[in-house]
Image (cartoon, rainbow, N blue to C red):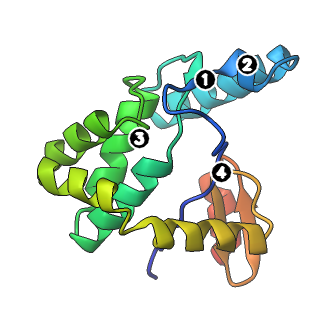
Amino acid sequence: MNLIMRVFPLHPEIPEAGMELSELFAGREAMIASMQARLQQVAAAEGLPLTSRSRTYNSRRAQELGKWAEAQGSGNAFYNAVYRAYFVDGVNIGLIDELTTIAASVGLSADDARSVLASGQYAAAVDADWQLALDKRITAVPTHLHEGKRLSGFSSYDDFVRLIS
């Protein structure tokens, strides 16, 4: 089975500098606390490091660079490094300098990464994924699709077995 990584427009309105979660979800502080508690619970159960954070960042550039990394055969390494930078280290993955550092950390050329972002050569691939998400009415991450079935959110191993069975 081939895993296909698709990207999703999660809050594309967030500016380059990022945004406080309390601003993004104004009036829904209880939801923020619940969401973060759930993330911490899932991460702890899986033995994954996760930092508590109060800011979120725009992931569009990271998505474009991820498509390039995939074409270089380093997609998994790049995505893992981006996830770690964002979820563990609290890095602003909307900034070009941060992304080129991440690319270099997995053996990709920082100069090439900078050129890819400046050229926008993978923008159409990201746009296509965003349109696919819209067409399939995907509104949450992660969402997994298999043979017409859907699994959204953090799920157990048994949930994945049911999805592919």
Residue at 34 percent across and 47 percent down: it is 80
Q: Are marks 2 and 1 in contact (CB under 8 Å)?
A: yes
Disc 1 element: strand
Disc 4 element: loop
Q: Earlier in the sequence, mark 3 or mark 4?
A: 3
Other residues around mark 2 within 10 Å, as few (<14) / some (14–19) / many (≥20): few
Q: CA distance from mark 3 to mark 4?
A: 13 Å
Residue 141, numbered circle: 4
Q: Earlier in the sequence, mark 4 or mark 2?
A: 2
Q: Are marks 4 and 1 in contact (CB under 8 Å)?
A: no
For residue 158, side relative to residue 108 (left or right): right
Residue 83, numbered circle: 3
Which residue is under mark 1?
Answer: 19
Disc 2 element: helix
Extreme-right residue of the structure = 27
Residue at 30 percent across and 65 percent down: it is 68
Q: Earlier in the sequence, mark 4 or mark 1?
A: 1
Residue at 41 percent across and 59 percent down: it is 64
